[in-house]
Image (cartoon, rainbow, N blue to C red):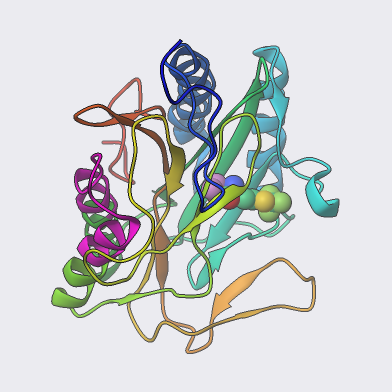
């Protein structure tokens, strides 16, 4: 047995074991494959409700379980957040219009392990300002991930994301964060997408968590609509998000939710 087997840190962060990475890879890969496969179903006139029905079927066909159906009363297999919706958009009968950008966020459970990932898509023609927002949001996520290694802190992750996004004159949403996950959906710590170097809990091998920055073209403030889920930018500016589930390794990180097809650009062209 390794010395840290079964441990939880003073911040309440669980330290997983070597064998647990395999379970996370299987769950993460399924979630990522679903995001690859749904790309062919995004077009002008499509509804987010139909996209969610297709995702529900993909989860079922894989013999997996949706983590979101029944979670705190949520009834769908995905969150689909269009344009100025920051996160937790509820699939509906509304049709996508030309130029709409959308985040699709899927969380599956496979053999008890959670895989949580999201990406951006576009219906029709991608505007240059939306393309820039999406590219910077993806790059901000990757800069956060590159800060992951034992000895760095969660503040280093948030700082890397914030410095980059703000250098591009975009803003980081403060009201939602990433989270520990593994054999549970949402566990400590809160993974902030802003912060100061050297602050927060120390990263250790065996920590599993998401990084999922939401970046706005305008101001960072959000509000939640009367449906109690849909979060939107207060100034109605466009918002984008990417999410990976990752694990800290001895010398860095592993991404559990890498796209099998390398599909990260919203047009998938
Ligand atoms: N997948 C989201 C996350 O990244 C959580 C969605 S919870 C739901 O943490 F209930 F809104 F689906
Ligand atoms: Co998440
Ligand atoms: Co998610």
State the residue at coordinates (19%, 80%). Answer: 169
Queried whether the magenta region covers residue 174, the answer comes back as no
Please name the predominant secondary structure of the magenta segment in the image. Answer: helix
How many numbered circles are shown? 0
State the residue at coordinates (47%, 89%). Answer: 235
State the residue at coordinates (64%, 60%). Answer: 89
Q: Nearer the viewer, residue 227 or 112?
A: 112
Q: Which residues are magenta?
A: 141-161
- View extreme (front): residue: 3
Q: Position of residue 82 (x, y in %)?
A: 53, 62
67 sits to left or right of 69? left
Q: Is residue 265 visible?
A: yes
Q: Position of residue 171 (x, y in %)?
A: 32, 78
- View extreme (left): residue: 167
Q: Nearer the viewer, residue 194 or 17?
A: 17
207 vs 83: above or below? above
Identify the image quadrant of the C terminus.
Answer: top left
251 vs 22: above or below? below
Q: Quadrant of residue 88?
A: bottom right
Q: Position of residue 255 (x, y in %)?
A: 34, 30
Q: Is residue 91 visible?
A: no
83 sits to left or right of 219? right
Q: Position of residue 205 (x, y in %)?
A: 34, 31
Q: Quadrant of residue 259?
A: top left
């Amino acid at each position: 047995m390794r010395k840290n087997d079964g441990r939880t840190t003073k911040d309440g962060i669980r330290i997983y074991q070597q064998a647990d990475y395999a379970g996370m890879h299987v769950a993460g890969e399924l979630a990522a494959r679903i995001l690859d496969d749904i790309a062919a179903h995004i077009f002008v006139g499509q509804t987010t409700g139909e996209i969610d029905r297709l995702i529900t079927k993909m989860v079922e066909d894989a013999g997996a379980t949706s983590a979101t159906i029944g979670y705190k009363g949520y009834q769908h297999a995905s969150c689909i957040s269009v344009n100025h919706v920051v996160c937790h958009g509820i699939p509906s009968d509304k049709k996508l219009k030309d130029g709409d950008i959308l985040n699709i966020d899927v969380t599956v459970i496979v053999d008890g392990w959670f895989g949580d990932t999201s990406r951006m898509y576009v219906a029709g023609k991608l505007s240059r300002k939306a393309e820039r927002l999406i590219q910077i949001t993806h790059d901000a996520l990757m800069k956060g991930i590159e800060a992951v290694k034992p000895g760095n802190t969660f503040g280093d992750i948030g700082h890397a994301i914030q410095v980059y996004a703000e250098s591009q004159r975009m803003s980081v949403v403060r009201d939602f964060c990433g989270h520990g996950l593994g054999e549970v959906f949402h566990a400590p710590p809160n993974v902030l997408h802003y912060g100061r170097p050297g602050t927060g809990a120390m990263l250790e091998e065996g920590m599993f968590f998401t990084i999922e920055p939401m970046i706005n073209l305008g101001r960072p403030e959000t509000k939640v609509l009367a449906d109690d889920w849909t979060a939107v930018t207060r100034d109605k500016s466009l918002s984008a998000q990417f999410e990976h589930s990752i694990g800290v390794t001895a010398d860095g990180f592993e991404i559990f939710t890498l796209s099998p097809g390398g599909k990260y650009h919203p047009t998938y062209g």
